[in-house]
Amino acid sequence: MFAHTSHLLADAARDVFKSHDITFSSRPTLYAAKRLSYDLMDIVFAPYGEHWRQIRKMSMLELLSVKRVNSFRRAREEVVARVMDSIAMRCRSPDPIDLSEAMIALTIDLTCRTAFGEKYGHGDIGGGRFHRILEETLTLLGGFCVADFFPRLAWVHNFTGLRAQLDRNFAELDAFYESVIEEHVREGRLPESGGNEDLVDVLLRLQKDPIDGMFSGSPSHTKAILADVFIAGSDTSSVALVWTMTELMKNPASMKKAQDEVRKAVQKNKHRVDETDLQQLHYLELIIKESLRLHPPVPLLVPRETIEDCNIRGYDIPAKTRVFVNARAIARDPKYWKDPMSFVRRGSTMTM
């Protein structure tokens, strides 16, 4: 369902998310996503139902809780410090720095460190091999596929090369997930809840001893959730960082003001910003929000699919309709945003 104007799209999206959220809560079965998510066993592409509810509950209570996020603070600070040291060293050379490469290396290393354990994410994981695999995976997930629109023509991809490319990419990712899981099991890495668990530890613990039936999946379930963490966690974060830095370079006054805020917040005897300083960086928070408004990492979000018939603003939407929400157009709608194409401090007339 596409709207021809952004304000109509925004109004329709409001009705979808506020009044018909359950109706639009499922996911379509996409050719590449089905393969890479181990037959829709993950969180992102799983259709609405009991399995989706269980893994969503598990992710909120175990994977994305405040306690879990805080437990990875040391890992975040170490990875960021290492990347900043690398950038500082390269700044001594007259050669330009590829910011995109640096940010994807940072996010891949950090994702691997927190998801797979301390031995992962020390620069080697963020190198060429995993960057190449991730790029190929994102191309497969986001590219045009005949079978997504005409499922009976899926056989065509046996001849287009898409099936072979997808199988090769899946095999590389699966082999990596399998080696990580085997290593955790072999080393007896099944600590009690909390402590220094990485995400593989959490999933293996819940697989062995599920909480209130919350998660008792097969190894394929575990690998499907790890795929979500690795693919979505690495790409979206790096895209957001690169666009934020791009906007700051285009707006030197905003860059200067952000730098002044950081220098004021950081104590004189410190050389780096740490997470305790973030609460003081209000202007930087506004910059990040404005960057996300202009450049959402997933402009059309993940497609949805209706589970029953409904009516949106006079249009009858039958069950099994695939729905795309154009978040980028909504965030640039002049009906709701003053001067929507400008990078400005929202809620104020003052340009950033």
Image (cartoon, rainbow, N blue to C red):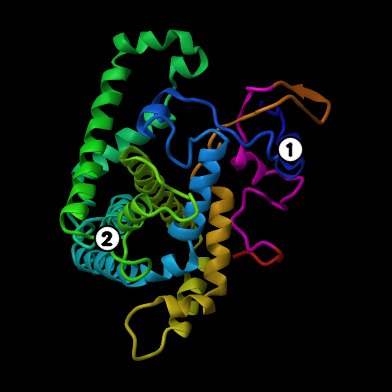
For disc 2, the marked residue is 190
Question: Please, is residue 145 above or below residue 117 in the view?
Answer: above
For disc 1, the marked residue is 20
Q: Earlier in the sequence, mark 1 or mark 2?
A: 1
- Structural distance between the alpha carbons of marks 1 and 2: 41 Å
- The kind of secondary structure element at disc 2 is loop
- The kind of secondary structure element at disc 1 is loop
Question: Please, is residue 190 above or below residue 280 in the view?
Answer: above
- Magenta stretch in the rendered image: 319-346
Is residue 301 in view from this perspective? no
Disc ID at residue 292: none
Crowd tier of the residue under label 2, counting other residues whose Cα lies within 10 Å: few below 14, some 14–19, many 20 or above: some
Name the residue type under label 1: His
Which percent across, then down, holds residue 275?
Answer: 42, 75
Q: Of 179 and 278, which appears nearest the observer?
A: 179
Q: Residue, x 51% and y 60% (percent of image)?
A: 251
Name the residue type under label 2: Leu
